[in-house]
Amino acid sequence: MSKDSVKLLNFWPSMFGLRVHYALDLKGVSYDYQEENLFNKSKELLEANPIYTKIPVLIHNGKPICESLVIVDYIDCVWPGSHKLLPEDPYEKAVARFWADFGDKKLYDAGSRLIRAMGEEHKKAGEDLKWALMKIDEALGTIAPGKPFFGGDAMNFADVALAPFICWFKGYQKVGGFVLPGPEEWPNLYKWVDAVNSVDAIKISTPSHDKIAEFAEVIRKRVIGAA
Amino acid sequence: MASVTLLTVWASPFSMRAKLALLLKGIEHEDLPQDLGNKSKLLLESNPVHKKIPVLIHKGKPVSESVIIVHYIDEVWPETSPLLPQDAFLRAKHRFWTDFIDKKIFDSLAQFMRSSDGGAAVNEEFIQNCMLLEGALAELGSEEDGPFFGGASMSFLDVMLAPYSVLIPGVEQVMGLKPASPEQCPRLHKLFGAVAEHPSAKAALPQIEKLKEFIQAHFARK
């Protein structure tokens, strides 16, 4: 049986790329990694994702798959054996998909506005970010009470979709000029953070929180400079 | 309460998708129209996070977000009219292009409807996005098999796209949107034509005349 060729095109601070890392690493899939310079995108990236020319892209046996949640879904389909990410039960699957989607619609959206908006919009983004994290804290308490992850004892699709934002917390706080509420206010969230950070597979690819914070501040300075 | 209930808004393309998926699979359900200006207790309890429609309630459990709902319907009732392909790579393509429809087609259409300057630039963007979708149709569906992404029968991606078969003419006729021409998007035109003839789609989608009244009332520039 010929060996699978698996390659991830990514840009290191991207939480979307990190989702793909997490899915592959949790399943123990070997893959090649190519760091992309977003100001000088490789021919391979432009050909693999002609619609958006964005990372992450997973290239599996020459075929490209784009959009992080589509990629994670694909990975779970192709390598189901170890560490299944989507539950078998359709309702539990729907709940996992909902919270993954929430990560895009509410958490990423607020974080993005926090970095790029000015004045009142910037302030509102900070409030929206905190609201999103509060909702995640509530959800963890409802969906898997007493368990560390959305997936119960192990990370599932929702955990993989949301965990990459953890390494951005420091950066968001620096850019937003606030300190996030702590474990007294969000006990489930912080238990989840600790649990995620303890998973060996997660440690493999997570970038330094300080480096992400530096990166976030660099972008913020550019935004302010251009305003 | 019925075993399957759908909280709907008839003019919403997201609501239409969920309805279409249920009808394609012949699933008996209760359709409960919602008033978004005065949200019902049921809606607020079923979708407390987003407070939006559609919501599918099956055996008392709510599922929100149209794409997630259609996935759910396909997984719970897989035997009739299966929507997602079996092959993992093709499934990824259906999901990618579904996301494209939401990010690019819906967004450019919505921007056109909100624009105060006539929307020429965003109209052009809309046409370009339709042409990209035409390319996807060429890649994913052989014309000999049928007009849909799924060939002779509607598939996941067709369900996601179907509402635009009424939305685009509605916005064109009320607000002057210039759609992609049959020369620019021949297969897309045939696909929309096939949707218009499909019995489930006819039941799930509003009449264009009724939609035009709605668009006129809510979006037309004074």
Image (cartoon, helix red, strand yellow):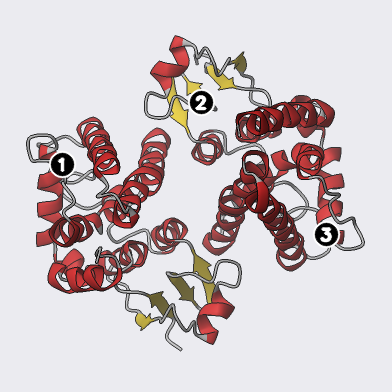
Which sits in the foreground, B114 or A158? B114
Could you give the CA–CA distance between mark 1 and mark 3, rounded to whole angstroms?
A: 50 Å
- Judging by the rendered image, the residue that carries numbered circle 1 is B180
Q: Which residue bears the numbered disc 2? A: A57
Determine if marks 1 and 3 fall on one subunit: no
Q: Look at the picture and state if A150 lies above or below B210.
A: above
What residue is rendered at 89% in x and 55% in y? A182
Q: Chain of mark 2?
A: A
Q: In the picture shown, does residue B157 fall above or below A199?
A: below
Badge 3: few (under 14), some or many (20 or more) residues near its Cα, within 10 Å? Answer: many
Q: Secondary structure at mark 2?
A: strand
Task: Name the residue: 52% across, 16% down.
Answer: A5
Q: Position of residue A202 (x, y in %)?
A: 77, 33
Q: Are marks 2 and 1 in contact (CB under 8 Å)?
A: no
Compared across the picture, whether B214 is left or right of A225 comes to left
Q: In front here: B97 or B140?
A: B97
- Pointer 2: residues within 10 angstroms few (<14), some, or many (20+)? many
Can you tell which mark lies on residue A127? none
Q: Say if A128 sits above or below A42 in the image.
A: below
Query: Contact, CB < 8 Å: mark 2 with mark 3?
Result: no
* Residue situated in front as seen by the camera: A195 or B54: B54
Q: Amino acid at mark 3?
A: Asn
Residue on which disc 3 sits: A188
